[in-house]
Image (cartoon, rainbow, N blue to C red):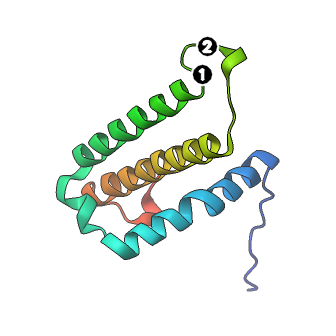
Amino acid sequence: MENKELIVESTPFEQDLDRVYREHVRSALSGRNKEYGDTNLMTWGEIGIVVRLYDKLARMSNELETAGLMSMQWSKYEQTKESKKARKEVWRDIAGYALQALRLVDETMGALPEEAT
């Protein structure tokens, strides 16, 4: 019997998610994993990730305040190159920590990657 692959077409939304993940999140996670390994996050588990997320959200709040977005003063809003870069880094880090938390939950629950939902 011939082995045929199922080809599923991605929607534009899914393609954009894949692009954002590849361009922003995957390389950052891979780089940090090479630097620190998994034991850094495994030491404190989900609580450690929550603490890191709190720090990232505080940084994002500061970035948005600086840009004039927290006070909803749109006339003062500045989309500077530095501000945009800083916000992208924070969102990337938040996405990365969320993915790491999912890995921790899967490992804690004993699930193999192909069993994860």
The residue carrying pointer 2 sits among few (fewer than 14), some (14 to 19) or many (20 or more) residues within 10 Å by Cα, namely few
Q: Circle 1 — which element?
A: loop
Q: Splitting the image into 4 quarters, where does residue 20 fall?
A: bottom right
Question: Can you say which quadrant of the picture contains the N terminus?
Answer: bottom right
Query: In the drawing, what numbered circle is on residue 29?
Result: none
Q: Who's the residue at 78% across and 55% down the image?
A: 10
Q: CA distance from mark 2 to mark 1?
A: 5 Å
> Is residue 90 toward the left or the right of residue 1 in the image?
left
Residue matched to label 1? 69
Give the number of marks: 2
Please tell me whether mark 2 sits on a helix, a strand or a loop. Answer: loop
Depth check, front residue: 48 or 78: 78
Residue lying farthest left? 43
Badge 2 amino acid? Met
Point 77% across, 60% down: residue: 8
Asked if the residue under mark 1 is in contact with the one under mark 2, i.e. CB atoms within 8 Å, the reply is yes
Residue under numbered circle 2: 72
The residue that appears at 72% across and 82% down in the rendered structure is: 3
Vertical comparison of 42 with 79: above or below: below
- Measuring from the top left, give residue 85's x and y in whole percent: 61, 48
Name the spot of residue 72 as percent of width and height, x first.
Answer: 61, 13
Query: In the rendered view, does 38 fall on the left or right side of 86?
Result: left
Task: Residue type at mark 1: give it.
Answer: Leu
Image quadrant assignment for residue 19: bottom right
Quick one: label 1, few (<14), some, or many (20+) residues within 10 Å?
Answer: some
Judge whether 60 appears above or below 116 on screen.
above
Which residue is rendered at x = 47% and y = 70% of the image? 30
| Residue 107 locus on image (x, y percent) | 30, 60
